[in-house]
Image (cartoon, coloured by chain):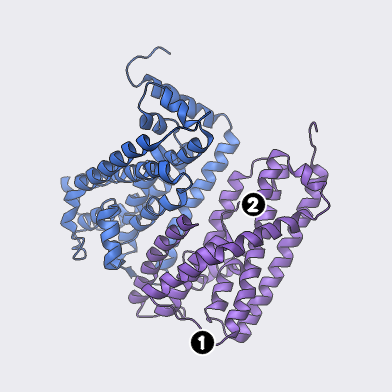
Chain colours: A blue, B purple
Amino acid sequence: MVSTGWSSPYRAVLASRIRAQRAYPTSFALDLASSLLVGLTELGEVWVVFANVTVLGGLDLDAVLLLFGLSNLAFSLADMVVGHVDTLPTYIRMGSLDAFYLRPLPLLAQLVTSDLTLKRLARIGVAAVALAAGLLRNDIHWGPQTLMLLGVALICGTAIFAGLFVCAASLQFFLVNGAELTSSFTYGGSYAASQPASIFPTPLKLVFGYLVPVAFTAYLPTLAILHLPGPPLLPSWAVWCTPAAVAWVWLTAMCLWRWGTRHYQGGGG
Amino acid sequence: MVAGLCTNVVFGFIRAAILFAALDSAGGSIAGYDQGSVGAYVWLSQGLLGAIQLNGAADVGDRVRTGDVAVDLTRPVDLQTWHLAEDLGRSAYTVLPRLLPSVAVGALTVGLAMPATAWPYVLGAASIVLGVTLSFYCRFAVNVLGFWLLDTRGLRTLYMVVSTFLAGLYVPVALFPDWLRTLAHTTPFPSILQVPIDIVSGRLGPTDAAKAFAVQCFWVAVACLAGRLLMAAGRRKLVVQGG
């Protein structure tokens, strides 16, 4: 395997991780199955609520399918690609993070490419099916604008969740054992993103709309695609500010990451 | 512990918002739930999560995987009861940093409808202990399957997903469609979380509460026995290399 260029070490690591996951097919199949069930249960939760009501926060079941599909697709893509950075506390505790520092490659790039969690493909599948159903069942006026909204939502949504994972990992340099705390905005963010943000009281709207801008991953795109107005704090035209939300999350992530890596003193030994 | 509390509270706010919106949309009440009882349900369940541990993990699983269980089996105490004692101790500790603050946050933000008489609290406290015990016995049984499966990770995830859903963590069991509610009641999971909450929050009258409590006792006995049978069978299966 002769490959040159800056990306070759990353590609080598990723290829080895993919081979490793394929080496135990039964175990991988079980992981896939449980990941599929996680996705289906989350969809089931939405469905159970709609067994009792027809409209939630101004969206009906079809609109919520679209919302669920968008948010979960973005989250599970981000989770597959960078979600494993939340193993950072283990590396810190075991002292194995120091080995990453010794290699002449950026630490974050190494961590991100240290794994690719293929079992998440099952969840991605569930989300994609929900999204497709949402797109088919809603009365959507197809045009270049809709396609662009979809594309922007998926790319920026994935970037937002990925940035949140990096923020969470950066905080681990200080918290060490605080994965439970940071999951309040990674997994909590994903949970909030799959709900119509109009149901939140004002403080939560501000938190999940602007501080942890997960409303930009699915709720605002859904409003824009379906031509719905949205609540006062989150008007549907705000969807065009999605790149700004991505910039905000990644700026925070990069600052926190710099701060965290400088704070890190090494595991000794 | 503080970290866990923060996450519990964030999820509590989101869950409360969803259920309140559903109540609004349904015209004020669904399946006997109103604003106050939904608040009580959400914040009690978030507060009890730390004690109840629906995640499927139990120390005994790791000890089976590493083979340390062989040493445990030579000790002159009953393995299941010993791990139960450990788990009850861990749960008791979470009451102070997890349950009470969570309920306080709920009371201060959304307001909870809690009963004014004493008996729901007394029976409810006993029911919570039974719920924690049942949760432990179920997790113990799942983890003991490691004697045959070696790696119970997939099974634990499966347990976590199914149990959280059927225990009524995200949506109360009473809101399930009929067939799903019937299905849930054929499993021990509602007895782990939904029943203790229903009793403490006074949603069940004295007779129904006593019935639910009896069902809990039944499931505790079943899960305890299942764990013991699996343990006994696993003991015969166990081969320890070296030593």
Dot 1 or dot 2: first in sequence order is 2
Residue A147: image tag? none
Specify the farthest residue to the bottom.
B117
Tell me residue B47's x, y (percent). 50, 66
Q: Is residue A230 above or below residue B30?
A: above
Question: Image point 36% across, 39% down: which residue?
Answer: A260
Tell me residue B70's x, y (percent). 78, 42
Tell me residue A10's x, y (percent). 39, 24
Residues at marks 1 and 2, common chain?
yes
Residue bearing mark 1: B116
Label 2's element? loop
Question: Image point 52% across, 78% down: which residue?
Answer: B201
Q: Is residue A63 above or below residue B64?
A: below
- In screen coordinates, is B218 left or right of B236? left
Q: Nearer the viewer, residue B121 or B131?
A: B121
Question: Image point 51% across, 67% down: which residue?
Answer: B99
Q: What is the crowding at mark 1: few (fewer than 14 residues within 10 Å), some, or many (at least 20)?
A: few
Q: Nearer the viewer, residue B104 or B240?
A: B104
Tell me residue B222's x, y (percent). 73, 64
- Is residue B176 visible in the rendered image? The answer is no
Q: Is residue A151 above or below residue B211?
A: above
Q: CA distance from mark 1 to mark 2?
A: 37 Å
Dot 2 amino acid type: Ala
Residue B58: image tag? 2
Dot 1 amino acid type: Ala
